[in-house]
Amino acid sequence: MGTMVTRYRIEDEIGRVLTVEGFFSYEVDDALQFRSEDEAYEEAAAFPGTTVERFERYSTFPDFFLSETVSIERSAA
C-alpha cells in the first residue's frame, strides 16, 4: 500500500533539476529528492540562483528518501 509524500528538489533559473550526480538536468525523474525543506535549502546554498521546489509524489515506501543516502555518501568522501 502506498501513499502520497511531500518532497523537495532544487531547480536552477531555467527549470533544470539537481541530480544525484551533482549536475542539472531537464529529466525531473533524475532529481535529487529531499524529505526535509531545511536540508534542501542547505544544499541549495551551494548553487547560487537556485530555488527549492515542493512537490508530491506517490511512494510505496513513505519513509524512504534519497537525500539521506546521498548525505551519507558525501560525509564518507
Image (cartoon, rainbow, N blue to C red):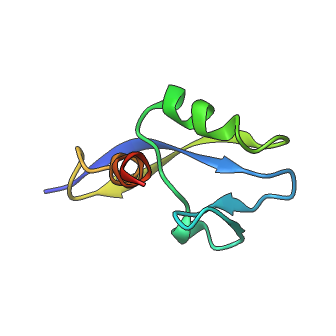
Viewer-proximal residue among 56 and 39: 39
Name, please, the residue furthest toward the front. Answer: 77
Residue 43 at what x, y percent from top left?
A: 60, 39
Q: Residue at x 85, y 42 (%)?
A: 49
Quadrant in the picture for the N terminus: bottom left
Classify residue 22 by image quadrant.
bottom right
Quadrant in the picture for the C terminus: bottom left
- Left or right side of 37 for 77: left
Q: Residue at x 35, y 56 (%)?
A: 58
Classify residue 5 by image quadrant.
top left
Above or below, 44 relative to 17: above
- Left or right side of 1 for 6: right
Q: Residue at x 61, y 31 (%)?
A: 41
Name, please, the residue furthest toward the top. Answer: 38
Viewer-proximal residue among 4 and 10: 10
Above or below, 11 relative to 6: below
Residue 28 at what x, y percent from top left?
A: 60, 67
Q: Residue at x 36, y 51 (%)?
A: 76
- Left or right side of 52 for 39: left
Above or below, 19 relative to 68: below
Residue 14 at what x, y percent from top left?
A: 86, 58
Viewer-proximal residue among 44 and 13: 44
